[in-house]
Image (cartoon, rainbow, N blue to C red):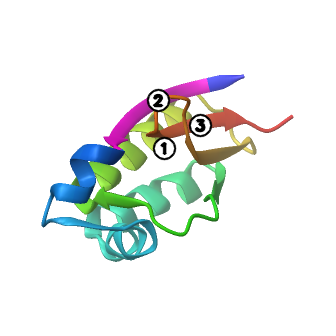
Amino acid sequence: MAIETLTIWNDRDAHDDPLALQLVDALQDFGKSRATRLLIRRGKESDVHCELRVPFLRDCRVRSDDLARALRKVWRAAIDGADPGDRFTIDLHIGPDSRLVVQAERNS
């Protein structure tokens, strides 16, 4: 069951954008962010566990700030709706319209 879903990226727009990075590089920026570290700490304090599932893509360009904003929003929604000990997965995948979809789902 999906907790929160956001669509953030359009293939045609990202390729022309000089600020767009490869998905792996944008994820590194997300991981280094102070806001991300605070969110991780909040999840640990709430005893809510998260897994991030990333697609194996050769060329996936995305704006780092858009990706970080979407990931944090989805992650926060999962933490807010979770009970202590819950686990969830944040899944990144390409939707049918070539957009990057960020979706949080509760693990059974």
**Rendered image: mark on residue 104:** 3
Marks 3 and 2, Cα distance to the nearest angstrom?
Answer: 19 Å
Nearest-to-viewer mark from 1 and 3: 3
Marks 1 and 3, Cα distance to the nearest angstrom?
Answer: 7 Å
Is the stretch drawn in magenta largely helix, strand or loop?
strand
- Identify residue type, mark 1: Trp
Where does residue 77 sit, x and y in percent of width and height?
Answer: 47, 32
Provide the residue designation for mark 1. Answer: 75
Instruction: Say if 91 sits above or below 65 in the image.
Output: above
| Picture residue at 69% right of the left edge, 41% below the top | 84
N-terminal of the pair, mark 2 or mark 1, is 1
* Quadrant hosting residue 28: bottom left
For disc 2, the neighbor class at 10 Å (few under 14, some 14 to 19, many from 20) is few
| Picture residue at 34% right of the left edge, 77% below the top | 32
Nearest-to-viewer mark from 3 and 2: 2
Q: What stretch is highlighted in magenta?
A: 3-10
| Picture residue at 54% right of the left edge, 53% below the top | 43
Helix, strand or loop at label 3? It is strand
| Residue located farthest toward the right when viewing the structure as drawn | 108
- Identify residue type, mark 2: Asp
Where does residue 61 sit, x and y in percent of width and height?
Answer: 35, 61
Nearest-to-viewer mark from 2 and 1: 2
Horizontal side of residue 5 vs 14, given as left or right = right
Mark 1 in CB contact with mark 3 (< 8 angstroms): yes
Determine if the magenta segment contains residue 46.
no
Provide the residue designation for mark 2. Answer: 97
